[in-house]
Image: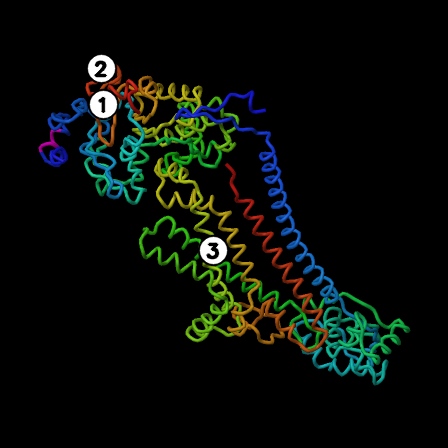
Amino acid sequence: MSGDKAPVFHVDGSRTAPTDWTSDAMRKRIAKRYAAERRFKYLGLAAVVLSASFLVFLLWVMVGNGISGFQRTEVRLDVDFPALTGGAQAASLTGPQAGTAAASMDLPGVVSVAIEAEYGDSGAQIFSPGAWQIVRKKLLAEPSLIAAKRTLWLPASSELDIAMKESGNAKTEALLADLRGKNLVRTGFNDTFLTGSDATDPAQAGIWSAFKGSLMTMLVTVLLAFPIGVLAALYLEEYAPKNRWTDLIEVSINNLAAVPSIIFGLLGLVVFLNWMHLPRSAAIVGGLTLALMTMPIIVIAGRNAIKSVPPSIREAALGIGASPVQVVFHHVLPLALPGILTGTIIGMARALGETAPLLLIGMRAFIPTAPGGLTDPSTVLPVQIYLWSDEVNRGFVEKTSAAIIVLLLFLLTMNALAIYLRNKFETRW
Amino acid sequence: MTDNDATNDPRARVARQTGGASSAADGPFQATGMADPKMSARGVNVFYGAKQAINDVSIDVGMDNVVAFIGPSGCGKSTFLRTLNRMNDTIPSARVEGDIRLDGEDIYAARMDVVQLRARVGMVFQKPNPFPKSIFDNVAYGPRIHGLAAGKTELDEIVERSLQRAGLWNEVKDRLTDSGTALSGGQQQRLCIARAIAVDPEVILMDEPCSALDPIATAKIEELIHALRGQYAIVIVTHNMQQAARVSQRTAFFHLGTLVEYGATSDIFTNPRQEKTKDYITGRYG
């Protein structure tokens, strides 16, 4: 084989046989190389499949458990409004005094009398203690209901709800079978879960106040962390002299990004609550604390994005007489923005899911009403999830999962928005 | 260093400003004495940290001819070019000594506005570097930041005129909104020249403008340099000796950070006075 090929001549005068590319050893080596490549490919694929299956499993479990949190069991109740309210007028339920008028009707009493009339002693086990609030809401929305005897569907008690969705004890199951036989029970959409606030009764518990709290906290965080982080990154990259002080600042920022979040909570507690006397449990304090945590992430991502802007663009702008500020705002920042936004997404996603620092600044309180402003006591979705997961009442299990679904949807929406913005600003060249 | 001292001497300054060449009696720059130089450099030293990149260079650049800087790689010709519009200011370790004047005005003086200087002394870089914006915005950027156009129509005029001068108008007039980066390499470089022209500079510095281009695009740029001659003082750094011979009227040969010889291009290429220049021209090293 190799005999008919010319030998290889070397500088020192020696000669060797030419490389035989078809020898057995060479073939073996090639086969081995291909095998290594295949192995590596399959390993990578396995890693991807494994992580994807974890994700699918997580979503499957969450959706499976949580979907029932968006539903509630309702039981039929006839309420004879004219008889029970002493002939109250529909007109009194309109206008600014409607709330007071509704309060003066003693609706809890009205509803409990109606329940006792229809279901007797077992009524208390059938209906949610907060069922009257649904009646109140319905009356305020539609005052004409009060003029006659009406058939309403009101939320069932937690036990009955669980028995309906999964299984209950023998007594509740019997009760449920009885109601089912008479067609007095149905499954409806739980709008209270989306519009209500935290409550001791799972049938009354809702996610809205936590959602709003999260929204306000994130707003404070992004409004503070984004501009400060971007400005810090710009200064460090474009203006700061390269000396030991800036090195020290760089190391500090990198370390700050790795500090456990609960320490930021302690910082928030000391600085914002004890020194600055900002209101406890408020979204503004939560936002400030999370902004401290998010800022280093934005600074690091921002610096990398700014670094990756080609120097030729800076030179081009400087070369036709752009001032350093013009170079930064006309060229560097627009080109770095996609990278900065990616860092912001990561930072905000981390902040949205953060629980520990918020516990320390009092955002774990029981908040039965949605916050009206940044300084009102509020809670956030992950803290709400944490609180519900700790509840004894079995009704909160599905609420916890449902809240997790809401949190994940919130996260997805936020990320989708950021990715949309990033693609919009992305320049290709 | 004696030359440096001489330039700091008040008498030498006066002599230079009046166009005399008394300080140039003992240097390689006898030919630098020009009646009315657009830019003049005297005793320029450039340091990168402790390393000296340019050693005592004195040169005059006139309005009516193209000056080519030639020399082997690392000889400091680009570094020196960048001192002429203070682009070296962007390198923190760079330090410039000596005296560089534009129309008799010291460009390193404290009251010299570097932003305005760079508008007056435009630059075209080795690698075409259009902004990732439309062709129109690329050219309009300079006039916009310097407020050179009173309105939209005036800006349109400036853009059209600049693109025409850069010989690019006919190729891009129908697609001014396309990205400047979508053009071919040669077109991008002419766009960069149009961008530099748009702010109406007095001097254009070109740092190896053709080294990233093919021969046809190079020929176009060279034609363009011919066409622009006389309207702007042009300094071009090039690796390509034929190019220097083709486009320039005066040539400066740099070697190891010093200016070895500066004179009429025809003299440098046919009758170099220095042995080093001759060796480089004949391809002995490079």
Is residue A416 shown in magenta? no
Question: Do pointers 1 and 3 mark residues of a single chain?
Answer: no
Residue B274's x, y, as percent?
A: 20, 21
Mark 2 lies on residue: B271
Amino acid at circle 3: Ile
Q: Which residue is mark 1?
A: B276
Question: Disc 2 and disc 3: Cα gap in Å?
Answer: 62 Å
- Residues drawn in magenta: B11-15
Q: Chain of mark 3?
A: A
Closer to the camera, A369 or A360? A360
Asked if the residue at tag 3 contacts the one at tag 1, i.e. Cβ–Cβ closer than 8 Å, the answer is no
Q: Would residue A123 appear left or right of A347 to someone viewing this image?
A: right
Q: Amino acid at mark 1?
A: Lys
Q: Chain of mark 2?
A: B
Label 2 is placed on what type of residue?
Answer: Asn
Marks 2 and 1: which is nearer the front?
Answer: 1
Residue B269, quarter of picture:
top left
Callout 3: 10 Å neighbours few (<14), some, many (20+)? many
Q: Nearer the viewer, mark 1 or mark 3?
A: 1
Question: At numbered mark 2, what does the secondary structure look like: helix, strand or loop?
Answer: loop
Q: Residue at x 61, y 71 (%)?
A: A386
Q: Is residue A285 above or below residue B189?
A: below
- Give yes or no for contact between labels 2 and 1 (Cβ–Cβ under 8 Å): no
Give the answer, above or below, for where A104 lies relative to B1: below
The answer to whether A30 appears left or right of A83 in the picture is left
Q: In the figure, is residue A94 to the left or right of B221? A: right
Q: Residue A298 — which label?
A: 3
